[in-house]
Amino acid sequence: MKLTTEEKEILNGSQGETMAKIMKTLVMFGDMAGAKRLVPVTHEGHLVTSFGISLIKPLFRIMDEIIDAGIKSKWQFTADPRPIDYKNVKCNVLNKLVFSKIMYGQQKRYEEQLQKVGLRKPSDFTCTCYLPEVGNTPKMGDILSWAESSAVVYANSVLGARCNRNSGMIDLFGNIIGKVPEFGLLLDENREANWVVNIKTTTLPEAQVLGSAIGMAVGDGVPFIKGLDKFLGKELDAKTCAYLKDMGAASASNGAVGLFHVQNLTPEAIQKGTAIIKTSPKHLDITDEYLQNVYNNYPVLWKNQNAKPTLCFIGCPHLSLEQLVDWTHRLTVALQENNKKKLAIRTIFTTSPAVLQAFQKKHEYQQLIDTGAKISSICPLMYTNNPIAGKKPIITNSNKLRTYSGARYYQDAEIVDILCGKKEGK
Ligand code: F3S
């Protein structure tokens, strides 16, 4: 990469040995990716590494070195959700022992380190940092140093910001230096669509299954999605944004999508129209049958395929305020229709601390709590992705959680039926 005089000086130690190492890492990362230069980050950061897993000792050592060198991140940051919340997501003794002593034994230490380096607020742990209640919301054209795949695809696609799917620590280093290597989705030519996806379904597809189908087909391509505005309308309101959040997260985890365009909806598709499609793109037609086939082929990893579920997670990525209200209405009606007062299965809704605070001011909050549901701000994947919790028959409406854990996926309507006791989950 071609570096400026100031960048070369940092690399040569003008701001100390630790800053030189951070700069060297960014330069090596940029060289590897074919970047020609570093460009300034223009908005707050977001870190994917939010968990104090005892095994990743180098992480804590590096954080200590950064703190000892007196370095503060140029851009403050939010971070992904915490892995544990004993109050709302109860664990048995063995589980708790594994979490506190073995898996997340360094959680307290790591959170203190994050605060010293530049965490915005002690409660800033969520993967949906871009929602208005949290307020880490980039604007169109902003350059970011983020890594969380669900947040990166949302920022690129729905907000029109520019960010690569970086890795943990690279996201932090970019925010410390205030610059990132310019390659991939930071460049105009790589933001053009190389896939055209035609939605030919009869109704609005389940966001999580559609995202999954697109991700599996296009891999790390950039899809231009036609026909979705027929169902979603032409306004990026809270409902549509929540839909695109879930669709994007599924496309990023079932594939490696970092950017999608939706005709007549997302900012770059509106700005450039079909001119944003490359010449000779690949095509994918999505029909009802296509999505049913995708859904039917999800593997069930439970040892006993007929086990009765004991836990349900809703909210991966974290739920928006509008989604929490909507789930409350759906479950309240379904319970009434089935003459039930409480949910049939222990159910955890996950959302950011900021959205939870806003939800607590609404009457639906008490309604949801009265169903027996709990609301937490943990990452369900961090909770389930271990040998003990992983053996439990857990159900979810999240394709990302299904992909990375043993949890079984159900579509929203089926989850409602299972939770109100109308359908046996198995
Ligand atoms: Fe968020 Fe954790 Fe899911 S970071 S997207 S809740 S895996």
Image (cartoon, rainbow, N blue to C red):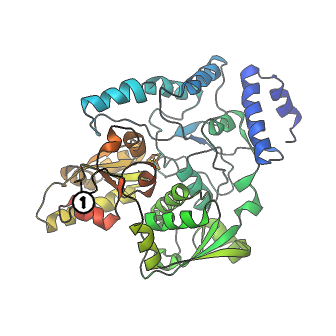
Residue 104 shows in this picture: no
Q: Is residue 396 above or below residue 10?
A: below
Q: Is residue 37 above or below residue 162?
A: above
Count of numbered circles on the image: 1
Outermost residue toward the top in this view: 68
Residue 287 percent across, percent down from the top left: 48, 79
Task: From the image, tell me which residue sits under label 1.
Answer: 425
Residue at coordinates 78% horizontally, 37% vertically from top-left?
A: 27
Quarter of the picture holding the N terminus: top right
Left or right: 12 in relation to 61: right
Residue at coordinates 43% horizontally, 37% vertically from top-left?
A: 82
Residue 280 percent across, percent down from the top left: 73, 76
Left or right: 28 in relation to 337: right
Residue at coordinates 86% horizontally, 38% vertically from top-left?
A: 3
Q: Quadrant of residue 281?
A: bottom right
Residue 405 shows in this picture: yes
In the image, 219 versus 82, the foreground residue is 219
Residue 246 percent across, percent down from the top left: 46, 60
Left or right: 212 in relation to 369: right
Residue at coordinates 45% horizontally, 69% vertically from top-left?
A: 294
Q: Residues within 10 Å of mark 1 (few under 14, many from 20)?
A: many
In the structure shown, which secondary structural element does the residue marked by tag 1 occupy?
loop
Quarter of the picture holding the C terminus: bottom left
Residue 403 percent across, percent down from the top left: 45, 53
Q: Is residue 156 above or below residue 377?
A: below
Outermost residue toward the left in this view: 339
In the image, 138 versus 345, the foreground residue is 345
Q: Quadrant of residue 216?
A: bottom right
Q: Ligand 1: does it lie within 8 Å of the C-beta at label 1? A: no
Question: Looking at numbered disc 1 in the image, what kind of residue is underneath it?
Answer: Gly
